[in-house]
Amino acid sequence: MSERAGCLKWPASEIHPQRAALFPSHLPFPVGWQPDESNGMLVNSASLGFFCAGFFWMLASPEDLWRQQAKVENSRYCPWDCMRFVQMWPGSFCVALERRFECVLPKDANSWTIHGLWPSYVRDCCSYWHLFPSDLVDLMSELDRHWPTFTNISNFQFWEKEWQKHGTCASCIETLNSPNKYFQAALILQTKYNIDGAFQRAAIVPSCSRSYQLSTFVTVLQPTLGDQYELQCVTDAQGRQILVQIKVSLYSNFSTGCSSDLYDISPYKPCSAERKVFYFPPNQENPRNPCP
């Protein structure tokens, strides 16, 4: 792991259930962190590590400690096995957007865009590792085009949120251990998992009147996305099931097929095969109800 990303975080799921309430959700300390000498609390990294280990020992059962140690050794300090590369469709993104957000669709929002690259089961792994514009200076124009926000915040603010929530957790592997590597990897993955191209080849086009069987999308996307992916839909006020997001499950080496039962709290749910699926065109004038 990069030293800049050196934050420690014990997953709450690994804590003995009777003691979980006593254990903080995370203990973030940058590698080599030193308290202020002026307060008489100078502690070296080894002492700090011993303190953290001792604190965890008091709270966790022997079985938990053994399981956590095995997990750390097997994962080389990376607490996740799978990640999801997520793309969203601007034509339906705003349908389920909370009213506290303003939906803003640019005129050129007519292709699938990146929503994020999300390691499974973990988030917000290092609150001290901030994203700066200088981290992305060579990627800015591509990110503006392929990873835009559709709300009333700037693109960079959106990227900041994605980096803080997901990128800091992804940084435990060498190929993603900096902001530049993380965002560049997502751009490369979008080129590889090209949903627009797959739909164009199959003559699947956005429409307010035409609907599709879920199996049609699955057949068209399988050669491009592999076997482990999920189509997510949202239901509008008229009860129509609308395609909005697609997640591809990947191993840490970016190969497909990693299976993860990650709990999803988003408003988007797996598309149902029992209902027709709509693929709405973007409507900049009325993005929350693109097909009245």
Image (cartoon, helix red, strand yellow):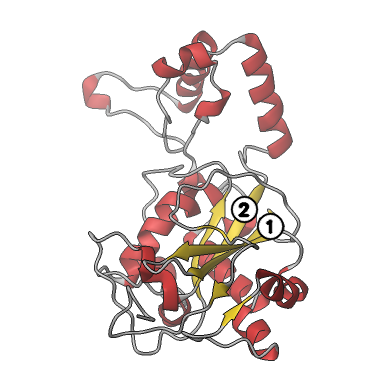
**Please, is residue 216 above or below residue 130 in the view?**
below
**Please, is residue 259 above or below residue 33 in the view?**
below
**Please, is residue 105 above or below residue 227 in the view?**
below
Q: Secondary structure at mark 1?
A: strand
Please name whichever residue, 286 or 182, is drawn nearer the observer in this view of the structure. Answer: 286
Please name whichever residue, 192 or 156, is drawn nearer the observer in this view of the structure. Answer: 192
Q: Is residue 251 left or right of residue 121?
A: right
- Residue type at mark 2: give it: Met
**Please, is residue 109 above or below residue 156 in the view?**
below
Please tell me in which quadrant of the rendered image residue 24 appears: top left
Q: Position of residue 68 (x, y in %)?
A: 64, 24
Numbered tag placed on residue 250 in the rendering: 1
- Residue type at mark 1: give it: Leu
| Location of mark 2 (residue) | 83
> How far apart in space, not on screen, are marks 2 and 1 (Cα)?
5 Å
Residue pictured at 26% horizontal, 18% vertical: 40
Are the residues flagged by discs 2 and 1 in contact, CB closer than 8 Å? yes
The C terminus appears in which quarter of the rendering?
bottom left
Q: Is residue 225 left or right of residue 195?
A: right
> Would you call the spot at circle 2 few (<14 residues within 10 Å), some (14-19), or many (20 or more)?
many
